[in-house]
Image (spheres, rainbow, N blue to C red):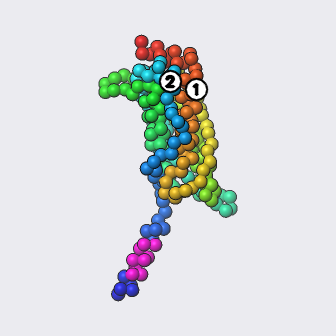
Amino acid sequence: MRLLSGSVLLLLVCACGCQTVTELAQPANVPVFVDSYKKIELCKKTGDVPCILNLVNCADKATLVEKNFSGSTTPGPTFPLRDIAEDECMPMVRANFRQVVAAEQAKIEIKLESRKAILMRDGDDLTFTLSFAVMILHPHHQDKPFFSKIYEVETIGTMMNEAQVPDCVYEAVQRILQKFITEIADDAYLVARLDELTK
């Protein structure tokens, strides 16, 4: 009986150890590829502009796709793209604008829409292609954006942890947001228009 029980226990341990990961978890310590989202000259003008974030058109999840020996691909685990985007966007908003408070009307809306999110795995090598449309809108006149542009980046990495979102995903999101906020800060005309919203 002891032998049988031990064998059953061993089989159970093996079965549990070989479970397929269906969703990659975010790491406890998110990797940082951008020193700061804060743009001093922008913040001086827009730091008091009440702003809301809109991610309704950002895909909730994206999928890691594995390349096989034959060259075909197989979908693997998903990862929480919208949650990652929100976690990165909020520090950018707080650094350069002001979050709305209860019962307050926002003066601008930053809207982010996912257009492409392809995480490709070949062995342990990873390539992540990410495309976001980023807009600055008036919450009540969304047909006339203050700013609208599509950004696309490609990052590379290595699969270090089979159950965790790889660093290259965070690098791509951070690089896009850094490009966006830098472009806004460098546009004197746009900054002046946003500054007018506080008057």
Specify whether residue 116 is in view.
no
Residue 22 highlighted magenta (yes or no): no
**Residue at the outermost right position:** 70
The mark found on residue 183 in the picture is 1
Residue at (59% x, 54% y) in the render: 158
Total numbered circles = 2
Q: Residue at x 58, y 32 (%)?
A: 179
Given the image, on which type of amino acid does mark 2 rest?
Ile
Q: Which residue is mark 2?
A: 40
Percent x, y of residue 152 = 61, 37
Please indicate whether residue 125 sits to the left or right of residue 25 in the image. Answer: right
| 10 Å crowding of disc 1: few (<14), some (14-19), many (20+) | few
* 1 vs 2, front mark: 2
Residue at image coords 47%, 19%: 44
**Nearer-the-camera pick, 38 or 193:** 38
Magenta segment: 6-14
Identify residue type, mark 1: Glu
Say whether residue 151 is visible: yes
Sequence-wise, which precedes: disc 1 or disc 2? 2
On the image, the x and y values in percent for residue 174 come to: 54, 38
Spot occupied by residue 23 in the image (x, y as percentages of width and height): 47, 54
Q: Is residue 19 above or below residue 43?
A: below
Percent position (x, y) of residue 102?
31, 27
Badge 2 marks a residue whose secondary structure is helix
Residue neighbourhood size for the residue with mark 2, other residues' Cα within 10 Å, grouped as few (<14), some (14–19), many (≥20)? few
